[in-house]
Image (cartoon, helix red, strand yellow):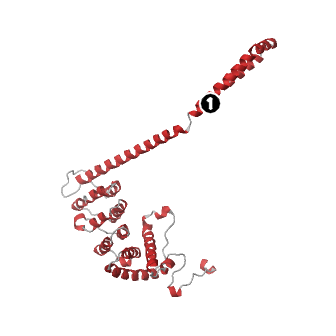
Amino acid sequence: MVLSRMASLFSLSSRPQALFRLASAANRSVCHRNFHLTAVARQTKDDDLFSSATPSGTPVSEASKSTTVKAKSQDAATRREQQFYELVEYVTDRTGRKRTIKAGQVRQTAWLRLFQLASSSEQLEMVAELFPRWRDSGKEFRSIHAEAFVRRCEELKCPTLALKVFGDHSKYGLGLSSLFAARHMLHSVYNKRPLSDSMTVAALFGVYNLPPVSSDLAACSMLYAACLKDHSANARVVGKALYEELQKQAHDKPPVKAPQESVIRARYAEKPNIWLLDALKTIEKVHKKTGKEWRWIRYWTTEREWRPRNTFTPMQPATTADHA
């Protein structure tokens, strides 16, 4: 509109001077009225424009986005569940003493896929019930399966399922053949489950020919922390022996530092050190409360070099030769 007005003014200026005076005199009042109406119209239009962008429209947009995200999430969950049951059927038909379908072969990775697709403890238990069919097919599980199964049991908050499976090797055929898996299983029960579950895991170390719990620093600290929460006489006896072994190992080994970066902490290989330090924090807290010695734990887990309490001295600054 502004451009058209300017165009009309430019066209008038191109006419003869007399005609311009007559036209300007005759149309002065009309132009004034038109400009007034134009301003009002533009203001009304602007008001309509900005009124459409008022915050009242925002919740509708956010609700629409939320509905879309929710729908996509439901679709993903539906596809995941469908994939889970399809793979369960595939494995069932192609394993066991008498396979229903001869064609096709179940790969080792199929079990890892089933662990990840299982979204509940019930589904994971359904997978566990397929383990005997794998053994009946003449196949064996590997350490990676034990580690993945224990990890998934903890994620789905069903650590007792891992106890059930590894506690009955003759039925399920999944062995606790990995020290990593054994540590992880102990980690999943020592803090929130009764001491009896931790003692069961400790017994499985021997059943599967793994190093004794007392010889592994992380496992020893977690089991001792579990004993501290139990006030029975048996817990005190076992805890005393574990505490002596824990002190001995801490004295003979260099301090352990947990990584601070979240990316590194997420690595499975870093977990035992993280579990060890978490258990030591629990032990230190209980020892402080009950009046037991705890300073050696603080010394061992800090920047300083750990020494026996009577001979402890701060580390001396490194000399130039140490950096050469």
**Residue 174 shows up from this direction:** no
Q: Is residue 235 visible?
A: yes
Q: Which of the 4 quarters of the picture holds residue 324? A: bottom right
Residue 297, image x, y percentages: 48, 78
95 to the left or right of 24: left
Work out whether residue 97 or residue 223 is closer to the camera in this orientation and state it.
Answer: 223
Image quarter of the N terminus: top right
Q: Which residue is the extreme one toward the left? A: 98
Residue type at numbered disc 1: Asp
> Which residue position is annotated with label 1?
46
User: Around disc 1, counting alpha carbons within 10 Å, would you say few (fewer than 14), some (14 to 19), or many (20 or more)?
Assistant: few
Q: Residue at x 52, y 37 (%)?
A: 57
Q: Is residue 25 above or below residue 145?
A: above
User: In the orientation shown, which residue stands out farthest toward the bottom?
Assistant: 310
Give the percent coordinates (x, y) of residue 277. 45, 72
**Which picture quadrant has residue 203?**
bottom left
Measuring from the top left, give residue 248's x and y in whole percent. 43, 83
Residue 113 x/y as whole percent? 34, 55
Q: Is residue 5 left or right of residue 323?
A: right
